[in-house]
Image (spheres, rainbow, N blue to C red):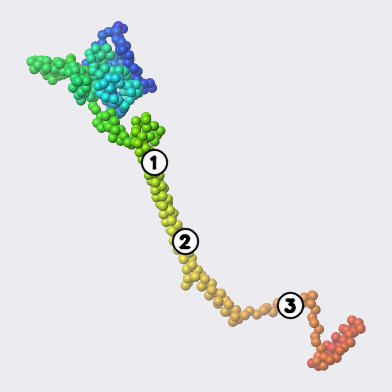
Amino acid sequence: MEELEHTCPHPRTTLTEPAIFARETSCDCRAPHERLTIAQARRGTPVDRPVRVYADGIFDLFHSGHARALMQAKNLFPNTYLIVGVCSDELTHKYKGFTVMTEHERYEALRHCRYVDEVLRDAPWTLTPEFLEKHKIDFVAHDDIPYSSAGSEDVYKHIKEAGRSMKPWIETFTFLICATPQTVFYLGVCFPGMFVPTQRTEGISTSDLITRIVRDYDVYARRNLQRGYTAKELNVSYINEKKYRLQNQVDRMKEKVRTVEEKSKHFVYRVEEKSHDLIQKWEEKSREFIGNFLELFGPDGTWKQVFQERSGRMLSYALSPRESPCNSPPRELSPLRSPSPPSPPARWHNARPSPPASPKGASASISSMSEGDEDEK
């Protein structure tokens, strides 16, 4: 049993490392490699015997169309080990044309695709039986559209027809023995084909991407000049360089004007919003002021009532003034001022009495004067 044990590498269980590069053969089997049938591959194989599926291409400007084709190839069978062949620059430039990415860049792009288990560098342009046997390939995956190149209408034609050569014999044998459809199915399994078709992703391809770049060449040249690339690196003439730089300046000015316009619109909008709020507040305040004014000075306002009350009170004061109370205290004379003596009668006007010699005499004269007045009365 140990002699028949396969030592093929297992499919990757983690995605923490890129795919490995293929050696002379990545499936060193001690026993001769027996190619699986489609029925065997679909039923599932032991872990130590994955289904070895091969897909090749140029993979220039690696995009989602490439990734989806590899995803289909990886999911053809429950236990698939996907080997991806990448053609070198020499073969590609010879049979297809110039590439954007170098072969090493294309190798690395494939190594970091999650569906790829192994990358085979410098893959052949046409698959030979020796190559398929060397790498122990069970099935070849590619889209079914004929790929014309290197003087051939379809470089995968011999792979597609590998399982079809026995089809006429199967149909004849079925007719002779009147086999049921189930018998036809099992006879077909005995002679399986190696080619398994995948579906192309419409709307994206390397040629489409290059067409976009060529169509918008001026835009990309101006962008790269603006990012610091030289005209020599872009293979741009002196006149075109000046034209592109002038266009970049014009675009920057347009962008500035557009920015100023946007800011101005925003400022005007803010001013309108603020003025609307201010006018609304003014209207509210003016209504409040008018209401307060009418409440104070209106026909039935507070000021009229106050005025009427004060006018009535003043009129009542004028018609009936208040009398001073009887028990009010008498007004006291100021101690600094003494009352002036009463003036003498008219008959004494010309007489000049002599001053008294003493205070007692003065008081006696004053008392005699008062007695004389009382007699006259």
Lower sequence index among marks 1 and 2: 1
Please tell me which residue lies in front, 331 or 285.
Answer: 285
Please tell me which residue lies in front, 178 or 320.
Answer: 178
Could you tell me which secondary element the residue under label 1 belongs to? helix
Neighbourhood count class around disc 3 (C-alpha, 10 Å): few under 14, some 14–19, many 20 upward: few
Could you tell me which secondary element the residue under label 2 belongs to? helix
Tag 1: amino acid: Gln
Q: Nearer the viewer, mark 1 or mark 3?
A: 1
When asked about the image quadrant of residue 27, the answer is: top left
Give the quarter of the figure containing the N terminus: top left
Lower sequence index among marks 2 and 3: 2
Estimate the x, y position of residue 291 in percent, counting from the top left. Answer: 46, 65
Residue 75 can be seen in this image: no
Name the residue that disc number 1 marks.
249
Q: Residue at x 22, y 16 (%)?
A: 37
Res 51 label: none
Estimate the x, y position of residue 35 in percent, counting from the top left. Answer: 23, 13
Lower sequence index among marks 1 and 3: 1
Q: How many marks?
A: 3
Q: Nearer the viewer, mark 2 or mark 3?
A: 2
Res 285 label: 2
Neighbourhood count class around disc 1 (C-alpha, 10 Å): few under 14, some 14–19, many 20 upward: few
Residue 17 can be seen in this image: yes
Estimate the x, y position of residue 309 in percent, counting from the top left. Answer: 54, 74
- Tell me the CA gap for discs 1 and 3: 104 Å
Neighbourhood count class around disc 2 (C-alpha, 10 Å): few under 14, some 14–19, many 20 upward: few
Name the residue that disc number 3 marks.
331
Tag 2: amino acid: Lys
